[in-house]
Amino acid sequence: MHKAFKFRLYPNKEQAILINKSIGSSRFIFNHFLAKWNDTYKETGKGLTYNTCANLLTSLKKQVEWLKEGDAHALQSSLRNLADAFDRFFKKQNDAPRFKSKKNPVQSYTTKIEKKNQWPEVSIIGNKIKLPKLGWVKFAKSREVEGRILSATIRRNPSGKYFVSILCERNDCPYVPVDQEKAVGIDLGLKDFAIFSDGKKEKAPKYFRKYEKQLAKAQRTMTRRTKGGANWRKARIKVAKIHEKITNARHDFLHKLSTKLIRENQVISTEDLQVKNMVKNHNVAKSITDAS
C-alpha cells in the first residue's frame, strides 16, 4: 500500500535558490528530450526509450554545466515521467506530452530513492527533512510519516510557498469496520450544498463570494502596475494568496465532509451531474463553480 504525506517546507534563502534551480533543470530536461523525441519520431517513425535518453543525459550534463547544480535524481525523474507519458499516450490513456512552461502556476520536481544506496537520500529527524542537494530543511510536521520513503516531490505554489509530498510504502492496510446496512443518498444543490436522504442538510459555504470583493480589489491593483516590475510581482503574489486562501478553505470543507461520509456509511449515492454543461449557464455559473 502506498500513502502520501504532504507538509509545508520552510527553506532558507540558499535552499530556496537550489529548489528553484532543480525545478528549472527538470523542466529543461523534460522539454529538451521531448523535442528530441518528436524529431526522432518524424525522421525514423520510432521514438526514444528511457535508457537512450538516460545515456544522452550524461553527455548533456557535460555540455550544460548548470544542470549539475540541481538535484540529479530530479533529472532522472523527468525522463521517467516523459517515458510514462508516451506509454500512456500510445495506450490511448491521455493526450501526447506537451512542453512545460515556467509560467505554470505550480512548479515542481521529484526525487526518487535509490534502493541500492545504504544511506537514504530522504530521511526525517524531528521537524527537519533531509533532501538531496538541500540538506536538512525545516518543515511543518503535522503528523508522523509511516512506512518506507519511496520519493519526495517538492512544489512551489503561485504565492511562493514550498511544499513536500512524501510517498511511502506501507505493509499494513488499516481498515475501520462500517455497518454494512448504512447507506446515504446525496442531492447536490446551490443554496444547500448537499441534502441527504435522512433529511439532513449541509449549507453551501460560498468561499469565493466571501472573498470576491477583496480579490477584485487586488486584481485591479495588479492591472495598474507595469507588468514584470517589482510592484507588479508584489501585487501578483497578493492575488495568488487570496486565491490560495479560497482554495484551502474549499478543500478543508470538502475533505472534512467527504471523510465524515465515508466513515459513517458503507454506500454513498449521488446524482450524475454534467457540470461542464451546467456552467455554460452564465446566470448560475459562478455559484456552481463556487460550490465545487
Image (cartoon, rainbow, N blue to C red):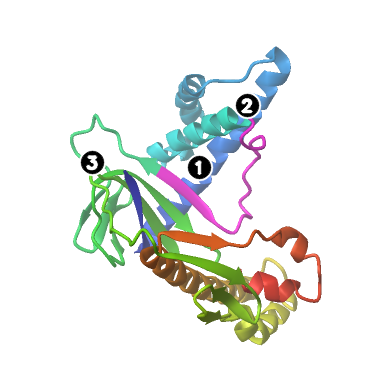
- The reply to whether the magenta stretch includes residue 102 is yes
Relative image position of residue 60 (x, y in whole percent): 51, 27
Q: The residue under label 2 is which amino acid type?
A: Phe
First reached walking from the N terminus: tag 2 or tag 3? 2
Relative image position of residue 206 (x, y in whole percent): 60, 81
Examine the rendered structure and indicate whether residue 277 appears above or below residue 77.
below
Residue 95 in the figure: left or right of residue 240: right
- The reply to whether the magenta stretch includes residue 257 is no
Q: Residue at x 55, y 68 (%)?
A: 186
Q: Residue at x 43, y 56 (%)?
A: 17
Magenta-drawn segment: 90-110
Which type of secondary structure does the marked residue at label 2 adopt? helix
Q: Which mark is residue 120?
A: 3
- The residue labelled by disc 2 is 90
For the residues labelled 1 and 2, the Cα–Cα distance comes to: 27 Å
Pick the quarter of the image with the N terminus. top left
- The residue labelled by disc 1 is 25
* Residue occupying the far top of the picture: 44
